[in-house]
Structure formats: structure tokens, C-alpha cells
Image (tube, rainbow, N blue to C red):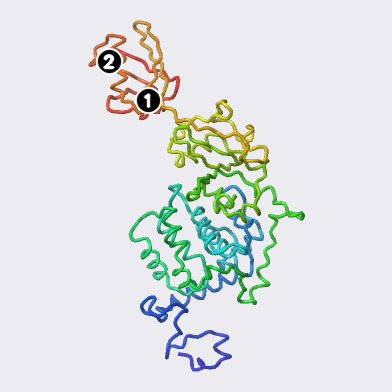
Amino acid sequence: RCSLINDPAHQAQYAHVARDWGRPPPDVPSGAYQPIFWESDQHIARANERRWRRDCIVEANPSMEHVRHLLDVIMGRATLDPGVARVVSVFFNQKSSGFSPQELMQFLVTCAFHVKGMTPLEAARFCFFALRRDMEHAIARDDVIFMLEHSLIEHTIEMPEMELRRRVVDIFGDTTYVIFDDFVRYFIHNYAMWYAFGVPVTVSGERSGRGGDVAPQLNPTLTLLKADGEPNAKARAPTAATTVSTSGAAPVSASTSTTAATPAAAITTATTQKTVPHDESVWRTFIARVQHSNKAFSVTAHVNDTIFDVMVMVQNSTGIRAACQEWRAGNVALDPKCRLGSTELGLGGNEVAAPEVIIIARDEAVRLVMVYKEKGFRWEVRLPSSEKVLKLRALVQHKTMIPLTRCVLRAHGSCLMDRHPLAHYNLQDGDVVTITQE
């Protein structure tokens, strides 16, 4: 134990822990967790590291353009800017030789919660869309813990890791996934939780920086913005589609990458939509309507996306599989293989007056060419891909009069078994099925 522990100059230089009476408790409500004092040396070291990272991100003063660039890097659509790389290097206190996607996602969440002009509630809503992987309308509960862990806002900096996890578990229970409606209702609108974290939810003032000694190290010289203020072309990487409900329901985004690239579509706030306009040469926004349910929603997609890419991204919103969707614009069917930039969708600048895209549900059927060489028979049959091979053999037996026990079907060199559906063999339109009698 150091004998100069009570010397103010020595304490300021070495920051020893006064073990005689312990460190003061973190600035959280009394009894918020047990014990209320510092739990261990690891807890103290973790809090110091998190304070350092919070100071770094505050002095760096990130903007939404940086957040979009980071997500493009995570998706592999852009290379990390040298200025951002230096800030990330200081943030993690390591060399900028290379950062893992997990580290970049941590930095992305921290930047989102410290973007000037975005409240913590809006940042939490944005991070919900950025952290989605498996499902369109939900994220894992561990992702909510991840978001809260790396937000680095106010009292969460000094809270132990298990305390943050306990708060999320108390809110959502032992569920695996958290849907967007529950996230908004029980997390974003949980003002008691934000108050416990020391976050003002009614006033969005500018955040004051801490640790001025790190300010000279953190002056990111980004090349993302040109001199005239227009975004650089490399930051405009192609991303997938974003869908936002127009009926006032919860906003739904269909791609993590686009949620960061077009936060206006994901956050659905009027102020953000005005600050991030869509460029028709890069983005297309149009209205899509499902024919059978009359459900309409707005779709924002990149010009390099194909129609089928957008079909895949909106299949959860439409309830129709991408292979069963047929898109029509002005009574003209759209080729799924054509790129969005080659069509007139989203042109004109007026989304309301633009023609709608009608999404029609079609049966997922496959057209097969049946060949019976012994009798010279050749005909076509169209069946749903979910139909069993037994049904196809029964149709062949009825036409060729081959006994069902002796009728054998082969496609791509493999024998078709009765118990399997046609989709099991990946049969495509025009595939030849040979018939033999054995």
C-alpha cells in the first residue's frame, strides 16, 4: 500500500485506490445493485476505460455521415477512412492495423449515441435497425444489452456489466428476441430507466466534452465530405432496400446497411428526413402496394439493386416469398433481374404522385418437361414446387399407363423419391425429367 495515497499531487498523478475506505460508489440510485460500492479492481479498470472511450468520442464530435460510413465499412462496401481509423485506434487504444466488425459495431453504437442533434431515444431507435440480423421486425435481447453497454451515456459508464444486463432482463424477461413494438414501448419510452441512467429525455442540449487533454489527438480529418459539402462518391455504396409503413404503424427497415445509409427512412422523423434528402441518381423511393391485402408502404432502394433484391428484402413486410412475388408498374411486369436504376421507379421527386408498384402473389410453380423415350412421349407439366414426387408419378402413370410400382423418374442424374417435394431436388423451369419402366 502506498504511503502517499492521501497526497493530492501524488494521487492526481498515479490515481491510487484508497483501500482504507474504498472508492466512492458510482453515481446511480442507492441500492440499484448490490453491493453499491465498487465491486472489484476489474470494475474500476473497466469504468476508467469507458470514461476514456467516452471522452474520445465526445472530442471527435461524430456526425451522421460518419455513422453511415462506418456501416458501409462493416458491410464491406467501403474502406475505412484514414481519419476515422485514427479515431477508432485511439478509442480502442490499439494500432490501426485492422479492426474486427464487432469492434466497428461497438464504435458505431457509441457514435450514434453521441451524434450532435440526435437524442438518445432516436439513437436507440436507430441502433435497433442497425443491429438486426435474422429478422426484420426484431433483434436479439443480447443486442439490446450490447446497445446499452456501448452507448457510453452518463451513468452507464460506471455501471457494472451485470447491472446493465439485469436492467434489460427485468424489462424483457427471458425472451430471446425483442420485437420493435415492445422495444419502443418498454425501452425507448421507459423514461424511468433513462432517468436512472442520468439521460435527459426532454431537453436535447449540446453535450459538453470531458478530458480536454485528449482533444489534440482527436481531430478526425475525414475525406468523406468534399469542399462544397457534398458527400463523396465512395460513401455512396450500394445498399439494399428500406421499407417504412405509411399507415402510422411501427417503422420497419429491411436491411441493416440501408438503415445506416438512410437513417431518415428508419427513424421516420420529419427533421431527419429534411436533413438527409434522397438523390435520385443514387436512391429511389416509391410506393409499393400488396394486391390482396391493399397494404401500402414506402420503399427506398439503391439504383444498383435488382428488383429481386428488393423482393427479398420486403418479403417479410408483404408476407409473400420473393419467388412468389410479381411486380407490376403501370400494368407492365417488371423483370426481377433488371436493376432499379434502369426503371422509372422513384423518378420525378414526388413520391405520392408517382405510380405505385403492385405486388401480386403468384403460386410458386415449376414447369417440367417429361420425356418417355421408349414411346417417344414428350410433354410439359406445371406443378407447385411443394408438391410431392408421388403426385408427379401418379400423373405420369395415368398418361403412360406404366404401373406405378415400375415407374421411375430421374432428373439431373438422381432418382426422384416419392417422399420428397419437388423443391428438394432444386428443379427449375424447363428441367427435363426422364421416365423409365423398371
Q: Residue at x 70, y 56 (%)?
A: 223
Of 189 and 130, nearer the camera is: 189
Q: Residue at x 38, y 54 (%)?
A: 177
Is 167 displayed left or right of 53 in the figure? left
Note whether 364 is above or below 13 in the view shown: above
Is 77 displayed left or right of 31 in the figure? right
Q: Quadrant of the N terminus?
A: bottom left
First in sequence: mark 1 vs mark 2: 1
Residue 425 percent across, percent down from the top left: 37, 28
**Residue hosting label 2:** 407
Q: Secondary structure at mark 1?
A: strand
Of 83 and 145, nearer the camera is: 145
Residue type highlighted by circle 2: Cys
**CA gap, disc 1 and disc 2:** 21 Å
Residue 361 percent across, percent down from the top left: 45, 30
Q: Secondary structure at mark 2?
A: strand
Q: Give the tally of numbered discs.
A: 2
Note whether 341 is above or below 54 in the view shown: above
Of 404 and 248, nearer the camera is: 248
User: In the rendering, which numbered label is found on residue 384?
Assistant: 1
Name the front one of labels 1 and 2: 1
Note whether 394 is above or below 5 in the view shown: above
Is residue 311 visible from the viewing direction of this image?
yes
Of 364 and 419, nearer the camera is: 364
Is 124 displayed left or right of 409 in the figure? right
Is residue 72 visible from the viewing direction of this image?
no
Residue type highlighted by circle 1: Pro
Q: Residue at x 61, y 40 (%)?
A: 352
Is 103 displayed left or right of 431 in the figure? right
Q: Are marks 1 and 2 in contact (CB under 8 Å)?
A: no
Quarter residue 171 falls in? bottom left
Q: Quadrant of the C terminus?
A: top left
